[in-house]
Image (spheres, grey):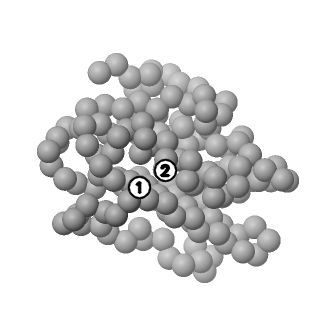
């Protein structure tokens, strides 16, 4: 399967909309397992002040026929650095795009946002109930205490 980024020099996309996510065949089709991406240094911009916002994202998914290629995911997530959006929109749009394009069996994302104005905001989205019998570990991000 041809990929856009893997093994090639790739620039950071100008925006999440312009980012191309690559998907490759699931190497273990028919096997139910969980894939986790931890993104402890996610950044975006506040849509009101254009000040930077920081989050620790945890993306868990159960693949079907495809898995997301990690370099393309890194570039997609990096494209949010110059993107103005509320925490809720960033978190949910990432989850929805991955789930929809990849046609995963199940996906959840936890957005653990660092405080702005003294209030941390945590945003959670999932595609539906987790598959039965799935080992689903805790996302491992403690409640806010200086994370």
Using the image, determine if residue 133 lies above or below residue 70: below
Residue plotted at (55% across, 43% down): 77
In the displayed structure image, the side of residue 89 where residue 2 appears, left or right: left
User: How far apart in space, not on screen, are marks 2 and 1 (Cα)?
Assistant: 8 Å
Identify residue for label 2: 95
Structural crowding at the residue carrying mark 2, measured as other residues with C-alpha within 10 Å and reported as few (<14), some (14–19) or many (≥20): many
Label 2 close to label 1 by CB (< 8 Å): yes
Q: Quick one: quadrant of the C terminus?
A: bottom right
Residue plotted at (22% across, 54% down): 33
Q: Secondary structure at mark 2?
A: helix
Question: Residue 90, how many percent across, how many down?
Answer: 62, 51
Please state which of residues 97 and 49 is positioned toward the viewer in this rendering. Answer: 97
Q: Secondary structure at mark 1?
A: loop
Mark in front: 2 vs 1: 1
Using the image, determine if residue 147 lies above or below residue 90: below
Using the image, determine if residue 52 lies above or below residue 78: below
Structural crowding at the residue carrying mark 1, measured as other residues with C-alpha within 10 Å and reported as few (<14), some (14–19) or many (≥20): some
Q: Quadrant of residue 12?
A: top right
Sequence-first tag of 2 and 1: 2
Q: Quadrant of residue 67?
A: top left
Question: Residue 141, how many percent across, how many down?
Answer: 48, 71
Residue 127's disc number: 1
- Furthest toward the left, the residue is 30
Residue 71: tell me if it is visible.
no
Residue plotted at (49% across, 47% down): 96
- Furthest toward the front, the residue is 128
């Amino acid at each position: 399967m041809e990929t856009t980024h893997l093994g090639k020099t790739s620039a950071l996309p100008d925006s999440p909309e312009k980012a191309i996510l690559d998907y490759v065949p699931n190497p273990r089709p028919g096997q139910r397992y969980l894939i986790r991406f931890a993104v402890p240094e996610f950044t975006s911009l506040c849509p009101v002040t254009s000040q930077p916002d920081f989050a620790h994202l945890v993306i868990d998914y159960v693949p079907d026929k495809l898995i997301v290629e990690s370099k393309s995911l890194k570039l997609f997530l990096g494209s949010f650095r110059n993107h103005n959006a509320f925490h809720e929109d960033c978190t949910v749009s990432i989850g929805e795009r991955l789930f929809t394009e990849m046609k995963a069996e199940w996906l959840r994302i936890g957005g653990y946002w660092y405080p702005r104005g003294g209030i941390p905001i945590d945003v959670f989205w999932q595609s539906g109930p987790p598959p039965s019998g799935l080992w689903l570990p805790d996302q491992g991000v403690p409640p806010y205490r200086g994370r």
